[in-house]
Image (spheres, rainbow, N blue to C red):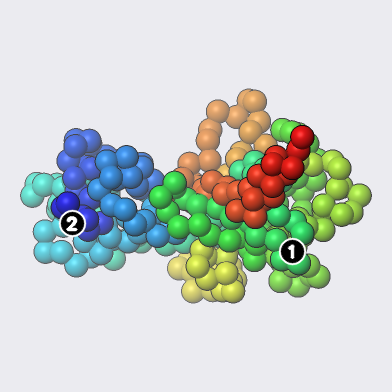
Amino acid sequence: MPSEMSWKQAIVQVLREEGGPLHYDTIVERISESQLRSSFGATPAATVASVISQSLKNDANPLFERVERGQVRLADDSSIAAGQKDDEQPDDVAGIVTAFGMYWDRSYVDWEPTKPRLLGQQSKNSDEVDFSDQIGVYLLYDRREIVYVGQSNEERKHSCIGQRLKLHTRNRLRSRWDRFSWFGLNPVGKSAAYYPLGNGTAGGQNSATKAIIDVMEAVLIEAIEPRQNRRQGDYFRGLEYLQVEDPQVAKKKLIQALQTP
């Protein structure tokens, strides 16, 4: 059996087969579909972005050329000169919202433990991540209707999103929601780290203010999906995680099915 490709080799093969530009998360999907790699980690889209950034920064003749935010194609000798310069801001710099989940199923979470797990993964082959310690914004739905918007931060009791959601399984909202969405600020894999706005941000407050406006707009589009709004939240491509059912919940369902006459 041939040895597994490196990330760089796999990216090159996918782009060569495409013959044009692809978004980072699409590259991950193609690598998975073609079985070019078996291990993906928790943030494969970020890994692809990092590999491309390192090539652009360090390789004498970079293999890649950025087309626009999050999109890349193979470069040839004539196009390298027009590609991204080393001192330009790379695409993999984290924004304010670092991860999010849309319309997650309440029944997929085991709410009995003191600290319930909110499990998700970026693609079917990537590592599972527990987002219960995230801080940010969450929305509760009765089917598709938003019934409550709340926040999770470090200054209030039951501060993390997991604890806030568990609270809503017991308070006056307990029978009024079946799904939830969340938008997190903490980087994946660094749940204890939080970087305040404007801390080390190029351009100071103006850059931070613009970023806030961009994120607020994208969050509203993603969460509410207004009928008259044709624009999608492309700012978040490559950050979404798909929910994974807690194995304990699946086990309980199996036991219950076996005990049912």
Element assignment for label 2: loop
* Kind of residue sitting beneath label 1: Pro
Q: Nearer the viewer, residue 87 or 238?
A: 238
The answer for how far apart the CA atoms under marks 2 and 1 are is: 42 Å
Element assignment for label 1: loop
Residue 109, image x and y in percent? Answer: 68, 52
Residue 129 appears left or right of 246:
left
Neighbour class for label 1 at 10 Å: few (<14), some, many (≥20)?
few
Q: Residue furthest front?
A: 261
Relative height, residue 144 to residue 131 (above, below): above
Residue 210 seen in the figure? no
Q: Which residue is depicted at the point 52% across and 49% down? A: 241
Q: Which residue is depicted at the point 56% across and 74% down? A: 193
Quarter residue 73 falls in: top left
Residue 32, image x and y in percent? Answer: 33, 45
Neighbour class for label 2 at 10 Å: few (<14), some, many (≥20)?
few
Relative height, residue 255 to residue 151 (above, below): above
Quarter residue 230 falls in: top right
| Mark 2 or 1, nearer chain start | 2
Give the numbered dot on residue 3: 2
Residue 243, image x and y in percent? Answer: 58, 47
Q: Which residue is depicted at the point 50% across and 52% down? A: 121
Q: Which residue matches tag 1?
A: 113
Q: Which residue is depicted at the point 57% across and 49% down? A: 244
* Kind of residue sitting beneath label 2: Ser
Residue 133, image x and y in percent? Answer: 64, 66
Q: Nearer the viewer, residue 30 or 62?
A: 30
Residue 162 appears left or right of 130:
right
